[in-house]
Amino acid sequence: MADLSRQALNIEDLRHMAKRRLTKALFDFCDKGSEDQIAMRDNRAALDRIKLRPRVLRNTSERHARSSILGKQHDLPILIGPTGPAGFVWYRGETELARAAAKANIPFTLASTSNTAMEKVYANGGGTQWFQLYVWRDPEAAFVTIQRALDAGFEALVVTVDSPVYNNREIDVRNGLVFPPKVTLQTAVDSLKHPRWLLGTAARYYMAEGKLPAFSNIHVPEEAKADATGYVSAKSKSFLNRDDTMDYDYLRRIRDMWPHKLLVKGILHPDDAVMVADAGADGIFVSNHAGNTNDTAVTPWDALPAIVEAAGDKLTIIADSGVRRGSDVLKALALGADAVAIGRATLYGVGAAGEAGAARAIEILESEILRTMAVLGVTDIPSIGREQILLPSELPVSGTGIS
Ligand SMILES: Cc1cc2nc3c(=O)[nH]c(=O)nc-3n(C[C@H](O)[C@H](O)[C@H](O)COP(=O)(O)O)c2cc1C
């Protein structure tokens, strides 16, 4: 079948392609944030407010975007961040994402809530792979998962700490979306309206396994199995309602157990950055989870400068939330990030066309990064710095750049 994603000129085009193919419930799960969508809007507004300061006549013909991420050479300053529903939007979508990342020589992060067994994704995906960990109601159970990720070969562990309770995603409740998925009249009608997803993804799982996929990378202790039936309200004691007891002692226990690179995801305060560095982390994701957790959280772009100042020399700093263009990536680097994680852009890609769609998303971002480097007058990533951007407070007349 022809790869439609080749026709996408930008990430928004891939988003539209994914929207047409996926059920409404699944697309909204990928596309929307929690509560009133404020953080999502703010993320974009914060990036849009930052202006680039082009320099000219610098012969940029030999430019490249190669970058060192956690001490390893990669071809771009980006990585694929963890997104739980990859395996729902495409058959074995996690492996498709991992393969696209491997071919582009950028890291891929497998989400805790993915469906394909981590050993299979690691073996079939190739390239640099990291594993993301959520800690559920029984914090001891997480150590079984960490050991599994270690045995499987993952190079880094990403511990997400910004969701001590499950997100207040009202849109999913309205759409009848629950995890693990349940067939209801509402979801059945939604599926029938999207035959490409129904036949290409859901039916393939039914044919291969007799059911839609479950979470295969979460260790649920025997005694919690009856109580691990879905995400629920913040007060629930269900196993799948995240753990709100996590603290620095717990992080240090993970540090003691995990011998490779350890990253903490969801940092927005400079003091937390310093404290996780002191607890032994190698890096952080400065992230508001793309507006999925706390709808009125500060944007990572507003938080980044103070965090870089406080802990930039102690930690690898990865930033994410709202990145849709190569110019956004360069703005993040200019603010002091070492690399940028991509969530929805590659998720739209895989939802639109599997590995080919994810590869198209990376290709679009790469071409925009290289194009923007030329207009900035830089030939390599280490040359990107604070002098290439103007923040709103530095513009002569607010927002226009005209004095
Ligand atoms: C649909 C969806 C699922 C996500 N699942 C996870 C997850 O399982 N674990 C996690 O740490 N972050 C998760 N994230 C957050 C991403 O890792 C990342 O922080 C965010 O998507 C980056 O913003 P962007 O999507 O605008 O690029 C998810 C994000 C989305 C959109």
Image (cartoon, rainbow, N blue to C red):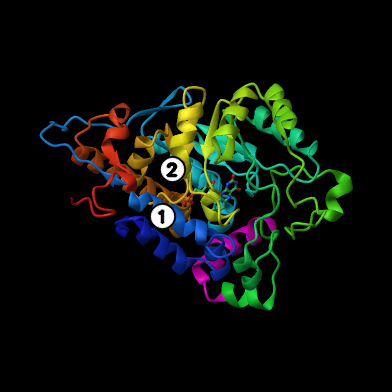
Left-right relation of 250 to 296: right
Q: Main secondary structure of the magenta part?
A: helix
Image-quadrant location for residue 190: bottom right
The stretch of residues the image draws in magenta is: 192-209
Could you say where residue 120 lies in the image, as x and y percent from the top left? 61, 39
Q: Which residue is mark 2?
A: 100
- Residue 79 visible: no
- Compared with 388, 253 (above or below) is above
- Comes first in the chain, label 2 or label 1: 1
Residue shown at 22% from the left, 50% from the top: 401
Residue 267 lies in the magenta-colored region: no
Secondary structure type for disc 2: helix
Residue shown at 66% from the left, 69% from the top: 173
Q: Alpha-carbon neighbours of circle 1 within 10 Å: few (<14), some, or many (≥20)?
A: some
Residue shown at 57% from the left, 61% from the top: 29
Q: Quadrant of the N terminus?
A: bottom left
Type of residue at label 2? Ala
Image-quadrant location for residue 24: bottom right
Secondary structure type for disc 1: helix
Type of residue at label 1? Arg
**Which disc is residue 44 wearing?**
1
In the foreground, 223 or 401: 401
Could you say where residue 170 lies in the image, as x and y percent from the top left? 63, 67
The residues tagged by marks 2 and 1 sit, at their Cα atoms, a distance apart of: 26 Å
Q: Nearer the viewer, mark 2 or mark 1?
A: 1
Residue 202 lies in the magenta-colored region: yes
Left-right relation of 101 to 90: left
In the foreground, 110 or 261: 261
In the foreground, 79 or 89: 79
Label 1 CB less than 8 angstroms from ligand 1:
no
